Amino acid sequence: MAKTRKQPRPKAETPKGFRDYFGAEVTQRAEMLNVIAAVYHRYGFDALESSAVETVEALGKFLPDVDRPNEGVFAWQEEDAAWLALRYDLTAPLARVYAQHRNDLPIPYRRYAMGPVWRNEKPGPGRFRQFYQCDADTVGSASMAADAEICAMLSDTLEAVGIARGDYVIRINNRKVLNGVMEVAGVLDPSDPEKFAHERGIVLRAIDKLDRLGPEGVRALLGKGREDESGDFTKGAGLGEDQVEVVLSFVLGKERIAEQLASIAEPAGKLNADWEAKYRSISETIEVGDRKSLSVDNQEFTNRLTCTYLRSIVDNSVVGAEGVAELEQIADLLAAQGYGPDRIVIDPSVVRGLGYYTGPVYEAELTFEIFDDKGRKRQFGSVAGGGRYDDLVKRFTGQAVPATGVSIGVDRLLAALREKGRITAQEIGPVVVTVMDRDRMADYQAMVAELRNAGVRAEVYLGNPKNFGNQLKYADRRNSPVAIIEGGDEKARGVVQIKDLILGAQIAQNATLEEWKERPSQFEVARGDLVAKVREILVAHDLGQA
């Protein structure tokens, strides 16, 4: 008789590209999302929780860098031959929700959504196949006031979670301006939008890599192509020199304006008399009085000048001129609310990778420096992005429905807050009530109940109580601030011992024997004063009631 083969044990490991989240990370994320939700709610946005699964048809073909809808997503086929997939973002599901329930929703419809999304892409350092997003969108309004509101709300959100003003900038551009540039560069034919689609895709991806590759790297990708350090060659868009220069004039507009302004500025910071000759071609819309009163480094002036510069590049393109006018309108609306260019600026280098954007696009970038894995300084980078997508709902209804919104990368924003010291990787654990006599578990549970009813996070040690040292080790591992001790002697005398674990650790690390004796970290108090003393210790460590 053949011997039955033993079933191998499964490997205890997460699938490639996925990870597990433990206590502190989950708690910190929830707390941050609550802060964000409060800002969104204050702006009049309502919460929406849509299905994690959508039909592949509903998701569409908008995942970055893929051409077919079943690439880049986790998809499967049902018995009825319908293809379903996990959502890859929170915007495509919103389009389906709005189209399905539009008769029951207010117009415009403001909604926010938070939750995990899934992308079937190659994982890498810090790049996972499942991650959290936090979105806010307005559907049904074509007004640039909706875009300005999203940018203002994003600014308020970053400051509410702990990103100080000066540590971030929200950069705005417009896809219509880019389309105008493409038209001037000869890679967009308004009468045949599908023509040159392949070349435009390469141009968009090249521009989006400006921060990583620099101007020369982008120039190479716009032309014949680029060979990286490893020798791998990436084929370019094949544009001619004149075409490349048009695109680069757009992408590098902010830098080129700054360089030219600096070259003609007087030491005092005012524009000098050479202005008229050097900028006559792009300064017709700026009043002479403004030129005299605004300094070169005045960002409001730079925003206006950037728009004038962009208008000169898009030349006779109707769609390009419309995009510039929208940027000017957004800047004016934000300025009227007090959101100046110290927080929100017009920046032509912002492209955004998704193909469904049709108008203004925006990106929130954190500007403080961090050290990368190799010890090099670099800016933290983008934590949020979005834009206007007026054609997304149209896929379902056949009618144009304007929409605009933003998505926050939750994990990246949490990482930024840790870098700035706004939150720590380890959270404070519960007060631990130790067990000195397992037959008196009811007494210990009564203590925990009193603490919890007073709003203090607490638990009873539920392991083997035989070794008291192991109980204190457990409390240390839980990062507990306080341990409660009541043995038979304490019970008879009507007292408890309260051990301040935070102070004890500080004394053990830094104090001499004499200082340790002068600063005891364990207190004996009457049983009835248990809650009051624990509160006192927590407040002393700035933990409130934990």
Image: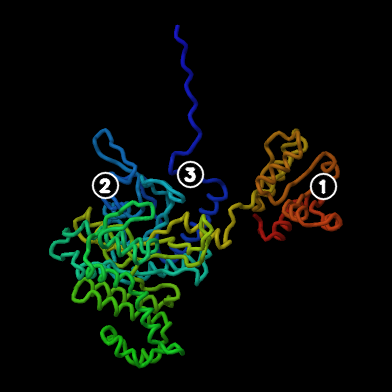
Residue 332 appears in the rendering: no
- Find disc 2 in the rendering and name its residue: 69
- Find disc 1 in the rendering and name its residue: 495
Q: Amino acid at mark 2?
A: Pro
- Find disc 3 in the rendering and name its residue: 19
Q: Amino acid at mark 3?
A: Arg
- Separation of residues labelled 2 and 3 (CA atoms): 25 Å
510 up-or-down from 275: above or below: above
Q: Position of residue 464 (x, y in %)?
A: 71, 33
Horizontal side of 416 relative to 262 (left or right) equals right
Labels 1 and 3 touching (C-beta < 8 A): no
Pick the quarter of the image with the N terminus. Answer: top left
Within 10 Å of the Cα at label 1, are there few (<14), some (14-19), or many (20+) other Cα atoms?
A: some
Nearer to me, 188 or 469: 188
The quarter of the displayed image where residue 407 is located: bottom left
* Between discs 1 and 3, the one toward the N terminus: 3
Element class at badge 1? strand
Labels 2 and 1 touching (C-beta < 8 A): no
240 up-or-down from 28: above or below: below
Q: Amino acid at mark 1?
A: Val
Total numbered badges shown on the rendered structure: 3
Element class at badge 3? loop
- Separation of residues labelled 1 and 3 (CA atoms): 46 Å
Q: Position of residue 518 (x, y in %)?
A: 85, 58
Q: Position of residue 436 (x, y in %)?
A: 77, 38
Tell us which disc is closer to us: 1 or 3. 3
